Image (cartoon, helix red, strand yellow):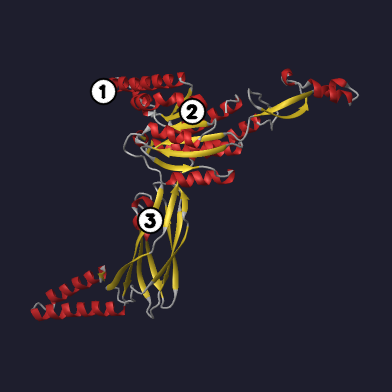
Amino acid sequence: MALTGRTALLAALGALVVGLLLPSRTGIGLVTGAVLIAVAVDLVLAAPVRSLRFGRGGDTTVRLGEPATVELTVTNPSGRLLRGLVRDAWAPSAWRPGTAEAASRHTLALPGGERRRITTVLTPTRRGDHQAHRVTVRSLGPLGLAGRQGSHLVPWTVRALPPFASRKHLPSRLARLRELDGRTSVLTRGQGTEFDSLREYLPGDDVRSIDWRASARRAANTAAGAGGLAVRTWRPERDRHILVVLDTGRTSAGRVGDAPRLDAALDAALLLTALATRAGDRIDLLAHDSRKRVTVAGSSAHEVLPAFTNAMAGLEPALHETDMRKLVATALKMAPQRSLIVLLTGLDAAPVEDGLRPLLPVLTKRHEVVLASVADPQLDVLAAGRGTLEAVYGAAAAEQTRADRRATAERLTRHGVTVLDAPPARIAPALADTYLALKAAGRL
């Protein structure tokens, strides 16, 4: 049973009647009895809630920060009109802060034998699966004094995918990829690239690209021999293997701005995936800390990006150190032949020196290795601080941290690793640019 504000108002009016007109036990009894009878009548006439039937429909996946629509179908098999409220409860992370109460509550007027469709709009604020909780229905009587209330389990899951904010950088990187592929007038020739085709010589072309045998054949078939020069065009090698390795250990849980480092790493991995599949390369995913969390391997070109996005949705940082020996061993199993291994991890000196650096010769002997780390832009702000004793100490600590990261990066570079250290807004395009540079240089 549920009482409404009208019941309290009716009781207050009854108290006035007793105080002004019937100041006696008899008056109290009469007023109390009248209120109780009215409440009892309302309860009897209210439509039952236990017999209601429910169904779900709508979105099952959504990008983080975007709205998802979930439909709740309510069927009233009784012969009474259902007047009341419906609360479609979800976890707090399924709503924008401060909007849960208004978005989850719906007014319902449902005649007997009919059904209605209620729409709930979710806006998840965290990646992963968001489960529907109970659906609570309060059925009020015709007087609006009291009603019946009951809850039902109506399961539904909405998966919040990574937002892929770096998608805005994809068109410009695809334009550069087309230049590398020779599909524009700007051609790039790099060591180890594949011969693509022949075309007519144009002013400004590298004379080293002239194919003299083809030019001689063309000259023999034309009246003007000078017009028969042919140049070779080149394109980067295709069908190369890339393995993206996400370190989901303790360092990935550190917050940079409003999000953990892992979120920026996921965004960078998605941009690289979209670019590499357009370039004709094969790309796999490994997420690892003390154990293997997620693997995606062998997906076709049109399936790999959705597969990566879906696999990344439920990844959360683990609050313990990454077992680099197991991580490297798993990566080598997934990349038995020469590959580009992109390791998204931290540049903290201790984990790198004790865990990763001793294992680098095994990786760099066979593979091209890129290490990408998410830097904290707040370090630059602190390093520029002056004016107070606290600011000076903060600047010294920030500068020491930056120096340690640079020293760690230099040691990794001496082992043949390409190191990127960029803030969250820059890590994704920087990784894409590094991939294109390696491809142009024929190092894949």
For disc 1, the neighbor class at 10 Å (few under 14, some 14 to 19, many from 20) is few
Disc 1 versus disc 3: nearer the observer: 3
Q: Is residue 107 left or right of residue 283?
A: left
Q: Is residue 194 left or right of residue 216?
A: left
Residue 388 image point, x, y percent = 27, 21
Considering the numbered disc 2 on the image, is that residue within a helix, a strand or a loop? strand
- Say which mark, if any, is on residue 390: 1
Gap between marks 1 and 3, in whole Å?
A: 46 Å
Considering the numbered disc 3 on the image, is that residue within a helix, a strand or a loop? strand
Residue 384 image point, x, y percent = 36, 21
Quadrant of residue 86 within the rendered picture: bottom left
Q: Is residue 251 left or right of residue 444?
A: left
Residue 113 image point, x, y percent = 43, 78
Disc 2 versus disc 3: nearer the observer: 2
Q: Is residue 360 left or right of residue 213?
A: left
Residue 350 image point, x, y percent = 33, 25
| Outermost residue to the left | 24
Residue carrying label 2:
370
Q: Earlier in the sequence, mark 1 or mark 2?
A: 2
Residue carrying label 3:
131
Give the quadrant of the C terminus.
top right
Above-or-below relation of 295 to 180: below
| Label tally | 3
Gap between marks 2 and 3, in whole Å?
A: 38 Å
Disc 1 versus disc 2: nearer the observer: 2
394 or 238: nearer the eye? 238
209 or 358: nearer the eye? 358
Does residue 384 appear anywhere in the picture? no
Q: Earlier in the sequence, mark 2 or mark 3?
A: 3
Gap between marks 1 and 2, in whole Å?
A: 37 Å
110 or 190: nearer the eye? 190
Above-or-below relation of 244 to 381: below
